[in-house]
Amino acid sequence: MPAPRSSFRARLRPPATAWKEVPWAARRSHLGRRGLAIGIDIGGTKVAAGVVDAEGRVLAEARRSTPGADPRAVEQTIVELVDELSADHRIASVGIGAAGWMDLDGGTVLFSPHLAWRNEPLRESLQKLLRRPVLLTNDADAAAWAEWRFGAGQGESRLVCITLGTGIGGAMVMDGRVERGRYGVAGEFGHQIIFPGGHRCECGNRGCWEQYASGNALGREARQLVRTNSPDGMALLEKAGGTADSITGAAVTALALDGDATSRELLADQGDWLGLGLANLAAALDPGMFVIGGGLCDAGELLAGPARDSFAKNLTGRGFRPMARIELAALGPRAGMIGAADLSRVSGRAHS
């Protein structure tokens, strides 16, 4: 392990000799107490950054458009954001969350779907440019950590977070640490095959969960309904300006919240698929709580209610085992930013 990173983590964590003797709930109270940090959430269209304090409060924010797929241009954007935010705040560290796979050491992006990062040694490069400690993490891991520390998952020792957006992302916080698996790529829950031979997924398989319970899936089902010329889809077609191809999951959600019966039915179908996938995960992982976040959760209980019913119906051993709670995320789109910042200041043992 390189000396600079070793010494940084040694400064941030409690004494190693005592750590294993401290219960997880007590460990949580020792985390994130060293000054302000900047969290950066890199998406396909925007880079959002914020100054975050030790209580998870965002004190200042800035953002830029994602500058294409050039790694150097993305690095320069990150530097600009950090310089802007640190002008008025004393920053101890920087955490960066991005979609993709990071190595277990947290220094290299193995693969990122939105950016041209392939085995990119991002942390080393950024630490030289920023002259501060940098932590690199998956965006779903960052959001899960934020919900565990400051949001809906507080107090839960075994937490699974699901993010419903274009696809389905996921992450786990187990006994006070982000669980990333043996190779650092755990949490790809959206690619469990839930319907063999079903819809083709971008990953190359058929029947993946995200093809049935994501924002994209909701939009696809609505478009298919409208193309049948069913009178049930007229409100959806009008919402999309008369063009079926323009119907999105967000439009369906908005109509459902306004009371449209067809949109509510489509959301309930998504909830059924969501609950089925959660039941599969419960059989494998046995968490105490699922926290559901992402844009599709704007539907609130119109989605969560059917998901809970489906979960109860499909859970293995139902009636003879405790059931995990299913809660909506509390921190909204800032979760990734807050989690990345907080992870950058905590013990290396929290992010393995």
Image (cartoon, rainbow, N blue to C red):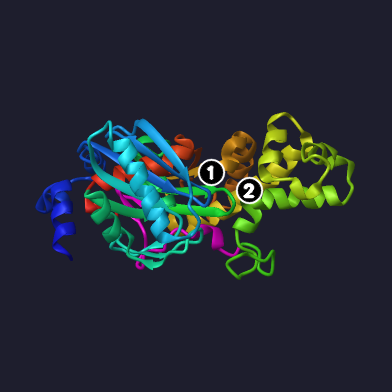
Q: Is residue 184 magenta?
A: yes
Q: Residues within 10 Å of mark 2 (few under 14, many from 20)?
A: many
Q: Which residue is mark 1?
A: 294
**Closer-to-camera residue (343/15):** 343
Q: Is residue 267 visible?
A: yes
Q: Are marks 2 and 1 in contact (CB under 8 Å)?
A: yes
* 171 in the magenta segment: no
Quarter residue 126 falls in: bottom left
Q: Amino acid at mark 2?
A: Gly
Could you tell me the amino acid type at mark 1? Gly
Q: Report which quarter residue 109 is drawn in.
A: bottom left
Q: Main secondary structure of the magenta part?
A: loop
Residue shown at the point (46%, 43%) measured from the top left:
64
Q: Position of residue 23 (x, y in %)?
A: 22, 45
Q: Toward the viewer: 19 or 95?
A: 95
Q: Which residues are magenta?
A: 173-193
At horizontal 74% and vertical 29% (from top left) the residue drawn is 259
Q: Which residue is disc 2 drawn over?
A: 215
The C terminus appears in which quarter of the rendering? bottom left
Q: Position of residue 167 (x, y in %)?
A: 58, 54
SS at mark 1 in the image: loop
Q: Which mark is residue 154?
A: none
